[in-house]
Image (tube, helix red, strand yellow):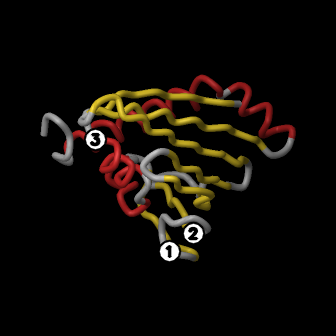
Amino acid sequence: MKSVVQLDIDVPRAPLAALFTDPELNTQWMDDIERIEPISGQLGKPGSRYRLVPKKGSMVFVATVVARDLPRESRLNLVASNVVVSVKGTLTALSPNRTRLVSEELFTFKGLLNKAFGFLAQRSIKKAHRQHMESFKRFAERQGVGANP
């Protein structure tokens, strides 16, 4: 299953890319994440791994930074017991102070039961993806690095 969210954000591309790819900032805009736990590598750099520990529930994701071509693109994989999510963020400058963020998430569910759940939960998953990205937009625009701080 694939989910794509596109948002125009009033922040220049380079500072926005820095905010978007810094795992230490995740807890400031992902309302459901309690903490980040580094596992290996330099946090946020290609090859690095870290845990995303939720505030509620037990679904812990292990994130691996696959690629960073900043300020244009980033890729990471999120792995949990029942799903793998490939995440691609693309940033396009619309003007000196405005950037388009396209976040693509490709979900691969493990096992027949999880595949059925994924199929039934598509709407909720896409809604959660949009909410995360809208939360990121609010966070980034509040940082004061945009056109209208």
- In this rendering, the count of numbered labels is 3
Nearer-N-terminus badge (2/3): 3
Q: Disc 3 marks which residue?
A: 12
- Which is more foreground, mark 3 or mark 1? 3
Residue 46, horizontal then vertical, whole percent:
57, 64
In the picture, the disc for residue 48 is 2
| Residue at 46% from the left image edge and 65% from the top image edge | 36
Q: Disc 1 marks which residue?
A: 42
Nearer-N-terminus badge (2/1): 1
Label 1: few (<14), some (14–19) or many (≥20) C-alpha neighbours in 10 Å: few
Query: Decide: marks 2, 1 in contact (CB < 8 A)?
Result: yes
Q: In terms of image quadrants, where is residue 135?
A: top left
Above or below, comparing residue 71 to residue 63 in the picture: above
Residue 118, horizontal then vertical, whole percent:
71, 33
Please, which residue is most extreme toward the front here? 96
Residue 33, horizontal then vertical, whole percent:
44, 54
Residue 19, horizontal then vertical, whole percent:
35, 52
Q: In terms of image quadrants, where is residue 132?
A: top left
User: Element type at marker 3?
Assistant: loop
9 left or right of 76 in image:
left
Q: CA distance from mark 3 to mark 1?
A: 25 Å
Above or below, comparing residue 91 to residue 29 in the picture: above
| Residue at 61% from the left image edge and 61% from the top image edge | 64
143 left or right of 106 in image:
left
User: Element type at marker 2?
Assistant: loop
Q: CA distance from mark 2 to mark 1?
A: 6 Å
Nearer-N-terminus badge (3/1): 3
Quarter of the figure that contains the C terminus: top left
